[in-house]
Image (tube, rainbow, N blue to C red):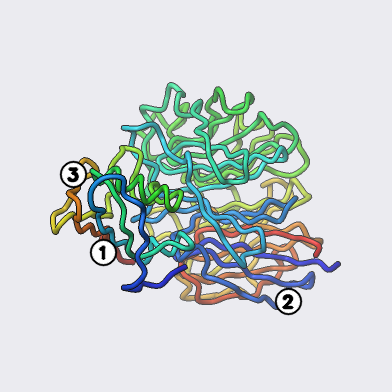
Amino acid sequence: MSAFSEDVLREKPSEAGAPVLVRLPPHLVVLFPGADRRVSLTAATVDEMVDGLDALWPGMRERICDETPAIRRHINVFVDGRRAKLSTPLAPGSDVFVITAISGG
Amino acid sequence: MATKVFILIGTRKGAFIAESDASRRSWELRGPFCETWPTNHVIADPASGTIYAGGGNEWFGPAVWKSTDFGASWTHSSEGLAYEAGQEPVKSVWSLATGRDGSLYAGVDPAGLFRSEDGGQSWTHVDGLQKHPTRPEWNAGGAGLILHSLVLDPADANKMWVGISAAGVFATEDGGATWETRNRGTRADYMPEGQNYPEFGQCVHCLVMAPGGGGRLYQQNHCGMYRSDDGGKKWESIEEGLPSSFGFPAAVHPRDPDSLYLIPLNGDIKGRFMPEGNTAVWRTRNAGSNWQAKREGLPQGDAYFNVLRQAMATDTMDPAGVYFGTNAGGLYASTDEGETWQCVAPHLPTITSVETLVIER
């Protein structure tokens, strides 16, 4: 398990274009030993980005997406400040935040 | 080698484990596990000692957690624990059961059944249940459309029973390919007059199998307590002598098919507490003909909690232990078949399930 750290940045070799930077919530990362809060990978859409995360840490796709398929109801993905869907395109260098909704009880 | 007794506890905020020796007098509590995910059912495979915890998280969906070291470390998976694309997604796991053939089953919300042949790493939908012709008419109960009771025949791996709120009891004799309703004789008081004994749609709360292999089942229903001596083909009311017809859990004795434990509440529209705020576990020794309230050591007066449907269990010791956990987070144990009780843990989160494991290690 890794704590959040600015200098921890997992690189996935990009085949074309600049990678996107993905930030993951701590309670997602804690489910995958060795996963990082920040990951850099190459993806043309949010869907491909989730595939990339799942390739790094098998099972992560099922935590972020349901079988609709869609991003889970209480998770939001923001791309360059805008709420995104699985089909949302990613420009090289995009900033992506995976964020969980406020939930109480 | 020494005997170890484990109480496996599911709560709204993770799984916990209480451990004792054969005396069951003092308990060491460990947890919370499973990253404090809402955990609906924690069980153990008695053959291997592997512990499984099923639940679901509002953010991250359903999962089955697994520990092969009595809770020291856990992994989780939900590979294949999903319906086909486009269907209403699986929200959470509600019930787990291990078969003698090594299979692991999971009942989920919305109601469906999944099977794992690799110890919970990957899952396959047992889709015969959802192909039952009554499926479009199943209605959710208060906790959702949940498959909460999962009973596997100890001798025949092809025989299973499930309890679904509020669709009723269903059974298969071909490993899950086809299913039939098993609700004859159980009431649905909430239906219009004259329609109170439907083929399906009963609000079964908890379904358990008596030991001995005779096909005896018991169920606590929203509308009554019942016994079946033919695998659920017909049911007989056993609620006479109990303070109400309403409650959630049921637990069988590990060896005596005539002994059953229930926790009647004061009814479904009066707060769902134990009558008069006095805690009692009711026991029968003759298959429901007579009942005795067991209260010694339990809170009497101003005890306004209830016990949820999967939150009572027995162990395999002799005399048998009986355990229950409350929605207010109290865990209670009896080591003398219900005669006397002690509080094992007073302040856990809401307890959703209680199971036991006895091993030699």
Marks 1 & 3, CB-CB < 8 Å contact: no
Question: Dot 3 surroundings within 10 Å: few (below 14), some, or many (20 or more)?
Answer: some
Identity of the residue drawn at 34% across and 72% down: A7
Question: Dot 2 surroundings within 10 Å: few (below 14), some, or many (20 or more)?
Answer: few
Q: Report the disc number at residue B25.
A: 2
Q: Quadrant of residue B218?
A: top right
Tell whether B320 sits left or right of B260: right
Residue type at mark 1: give it: Ile
Of A33 and B92, which appears nearest the observer?
Answer: A33
Residue type at mark 2: give it: Arg
Quadrant where the N terminus of chain B lies? bottom right
Q: Same chain for labels 1 and 3? Say yes or no.
A: yes
**Whole-percent x and y of residue B246?**
49, 51
Q: Mark 2 against mark 3, which lies toward the viewer?
A: 3
Residue type at mark 3: give it: Pro
Of A1 and B132, which appears nearest the observer?
Answer: A1
Tally of numbered tags: 3
Give the answer, above or below, for where B244 lies relative to A86.
Answer: below
Q: Report the disc number at residue A89.
A: 3
The CA distance from mark 2 to mark 1 is 42 Å
The CA distance from mark 2 to mark 3 is 61 Å
Name the chain letter of the residue that bears numbered label 2: B
Identity of the residue drawn at 65% across and 54% down: B44
Secondary element under disc 3, as helix, strand or loop, is loop
Is residue B143 something one can see in this rendering?
Answer: no
Q: Quadrant of residue B235?
A: top right
Secondary element under disc 2, as helix, strand or loop, is loop
**Whole-percent x and y of residue B14?**
48, 64
Residue at which label 1 appears: A102
